[in-house]
Image (cartoon, rainbow, N blue to C red):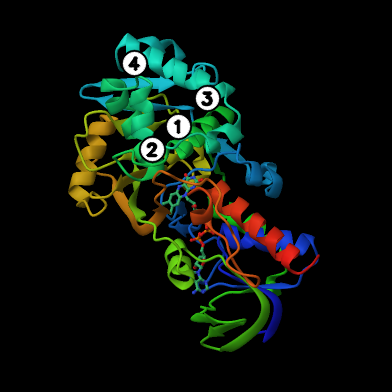
Amino acid sequence: MKQKVEVAIIGAGLAGLACALELQKNKIDFQIFEASDGVGGRVRSDIVDGFILDRGFQLYNPSYTEGQRLLDYQALDLKPFTPGVAIRDGKSLRIVVDPFRSKDFRYRLLKDLPGSIFSQLGLLSYFLKYLITADAQISVSADISAQQSLTKSGIKGSLLEKLFRPFLQGVFLESELNTSRKFLDTVLKTFLRGIPSLPAQGMQQISNQLAAKIPSENISLNTKVLRIEGNKLITPDGEIETKKIVVATDPSTAISWLNLEVKEMHSVSTWYFKADQKVNSIVRSKPLLFVDGKKSGPLTNAVVLTNAAPSYAPTGQVLVAASAISPNEHAELIEVKKHLAVLFGVPTDDWELIKKYEIKEALPAMTPPYSLIDSNQINSDLFVAGDHRATSSIQGALISGTNAATLVKVSLGL
Ligand SMILES: Cc1cc2nc3c(=O)[nH]c(=O)nc-3n(C[C@H](O)[C@H](O)[C@H](O)COP(=O)(O)OP(=O)(O)OC[C@H]3O[C@@H](n4cnc5c(N)ncnc54)[C@H](O)[C@@H]3O)c2cc1C
């Protein structure tokens, strides 16, 4: 391991990798120090018995601008979901899709959209407003919570409780919709511009693609930085001297090292099941996210992943992901299976649990008033990158990494 580097990046998550790519573009010497055995941080996947399991159910939205700049979408072979949701509402199933981008089920929209005509008009005006609002306007206008913003526009009653809350709690990983309106509006715009998708070979391909552009000798895996002392990193294998340091760790580590404002972290669990083909009959094998409008069990959402990306399972097999946010992330397997039977309307007794992931620190909270982009510079030699400096998303992590590198470059007088 090198004992002297110009720029040390701590963490090989998406922020650290984006930072490295920007430094590399500017011919600045760098070394990434990563505590774990691989790149990607929160965007990693495992292969278990031929099934691809992302470490927590997640999707990539191709409209992310930093992703468009840094990733090769063709090589990722993105598999889109149906833009919409299937809402379990007691015995009935409401299928609410974007009528302009999905011909499947669109004739059901008028019948299946929950809520009164007034709240539906509120929804229409909310979307029209955000279609014509410039991105820059989203960040400058006053901030309130997502729930306040929706109800203020008339989105309340069953439209809120059966569609918006069940859907958004899976995005924000919190059920009160206390997340900043700015992030809500950013998310809605992102959904209007791109269809959430899965790379055919798993979410980790996103991380791998970025890392593949960096010489492997510039990434030191299994190297945990214990602490920073001035311009030195202290690792179990010795000290590394450096001119500039970019802290691109997980939010909790960065916050404690750099004395930043504390952010609550939202947790989530995902159970992966080997299911049977019966589950596909219900929505004609379309990749739809299922939510429960009646909250009749612990799950936040569930989805047949192989309907979007058959490559996630051995040929002919069916992979289901079921996720639950706090306080249900420790739900018993029996309750989870029972809820899946309600959601999909098929027996699940024979479904086999492949693996469960409990992610305690999945997303940093974005409570109002929230700044969609925070400073990446601590002092002339110390920088910080990560989703907690922008938005809790892949786009947020990537852009904050790029921004940190730009500041490093300026501080080096380049
Ligand atoms: C379950 C789940 C679902 C999600 N769903 C979505 C989604 O659908 N869409 C979306 O856009 N985003 C989603 N996200 C969010 C997105 O994955 C994150 O915002 C993003 O990956 C954060 O990247 P990061 O680089 O900021 O941090 P991290 O990924 O946390 O990377 C930090 C890295 O630093 C390393 N590190 C920490 N401490 C040290 C140390 N002392 N020394 C060396 N290395 C260290 C860690 O090992 C890690 O590799 C989801 C996240 C989770 C967990």
Q: Is residue 247 left or right of residue 7?
A: left
Query: Looking at the rendering, which quadrant does residue 305 occupy?
Result: top left
Q: Count neighbours of disc 1 (C-alpha within 10 A) and say few if under 14, some if 14 to 19, many if 20 or more.
A: many
Q: Amino acid at mark 1?
A: Pro
Q: Are marks 3 and 2 in contact (CB under 8 Å)?
A: no
Q: Which mark is residue 287?
A: 1
Q: Amino acid at mark 2?
A: Val
Q: Earlier in the sequence, mark 2 or mark 4?
A: 4
Q: Earlier in the sequence, mark 4 or mark 3?
A: 4
Q: CA gap, disc 1 to disc 3?
A: 26 Å
Q: Which residue in the structure is indicated by mark 4?
A: 119
Q: Which residue in the structure is indicated by mark 3?
A: 130
Element on which disc 1 rests: loop
Q: Are marks 4 and 3 in contact (CB under 8 Å)?
A: no
Q: Is residue 47 above or below residue 318?
A: below
Q: Look at discs 4 and 1 and give the one toward the viewer.
A: 4
